[in-house]
Image: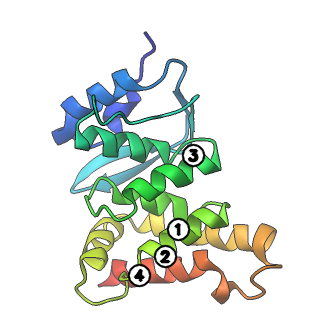
């Protein structure tokens, strides 16, 4: 059996039992990239893997609890295949649980613009004062300013290198619009 102990560090300690179950459910030969973003969620450090390499992560409603399914979807957002990331994102993008939010934010600074567009289309209330989205994302981003800095840098870099022809100005680029909305949420 392969050691997937890193899964325990990717979710809050209050979900330790569920994380252990999820780690046992991951396909054999699933590995996480050595780079992991350490973020704080509700005062607790979590290690969000940058990339997962696996043949597939498939929640099973007949076997996995709803929390375990969401955890598997969160991990799926870190998969090496962009289509897989997008499929898993769609399952959790509207979930405002504090431990889900970091997985969604991580996708904003990625190069696959179709994924960024899914996030933008789903998070339409980040700038609405007092909205549930603004509170959830602001609660995560305010104590993690580096996350927003890195996300904004990646957005600019990917726009410049890959998407400038489709969006001639940075302000038009979906990732930039999202980064600005996340900034508003962080400052609320």
Instruction: Identify the mark at residue 118; answer none if there is no mark.
Output: 1
Q: CA distance from mark 2 to mark 4?
A: 6 Å
Residue ID at (62%, 41%): 80
The mark that comes first in sequence, 3 or 1, is 3
Q: Quadrant of the N terminus?
A: top left
Q: Which residue is label 4 attached to?
A: 124
Q: Position of residue 39 (x, y in %)?
A: 37, 53
Q: CA distance from mark 1 to mark 2?
A: 5 Å
Q: Position of residue 100 (x, y in %)?
A: 33, 55
Along the horizontal axis of the image, is 28 left or right of 164?
Answer: left
Q: Is residue 42 left or right of residue 165?
A: left
Badge 1 vs badge 2, beta-carbon distance below 8 Å:
yes
Q: Secondary structure at mark 3?
A: helix
Q: Quadrant of the C terminus?
A: bottom left
In three-dimensional space, the C-alpha distance between marks 4 and 3, rounded to whole angstroms, equals: 23 Å
Residue at numbered disc 3: 84
Q: What is the secondary structure assignment of the residue under circle 1?
A: helix
């Amino acid at each position: 059996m392969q050691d997937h102990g890193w899964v325990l560090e990717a979710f809050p300690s209050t979900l330790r039992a569920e994380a252990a179950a999820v780690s046992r459910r991951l396909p054999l030969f699933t590995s996480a990239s050595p780079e992991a973003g350490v973020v704080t969620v509700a005062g607790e450090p979590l290690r969000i893997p940058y990339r997962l390499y696996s043949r597939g992560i498939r929640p099973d409603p007949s076997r996995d609890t709803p929390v375990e399914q969401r955890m598997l979807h969160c991990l799926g957002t870190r998969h090496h295949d962009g289509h897989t990331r997008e499929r898993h994102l769609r399952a959790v993008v509207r979930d405002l649980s504090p431990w889900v939010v970091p997985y969604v934010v991580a996708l904003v600074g990625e190069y696959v613009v179709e994924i960024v567009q899914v996030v933008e289309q789903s998070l339409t209330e980040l700038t609405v004062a007092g909205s549930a989205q603004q509170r959830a994302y602001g609660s995560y981003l305010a104590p993690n300013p580096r996350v927003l800095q890195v996300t904004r840098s990646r957005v600019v870099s990917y726009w410049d290198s890959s998407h400038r022809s489709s969006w001639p100005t940075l302000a038009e680029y979906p990732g930039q619009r999202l980064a600005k909305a996340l900034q508003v949420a962080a400052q609320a």
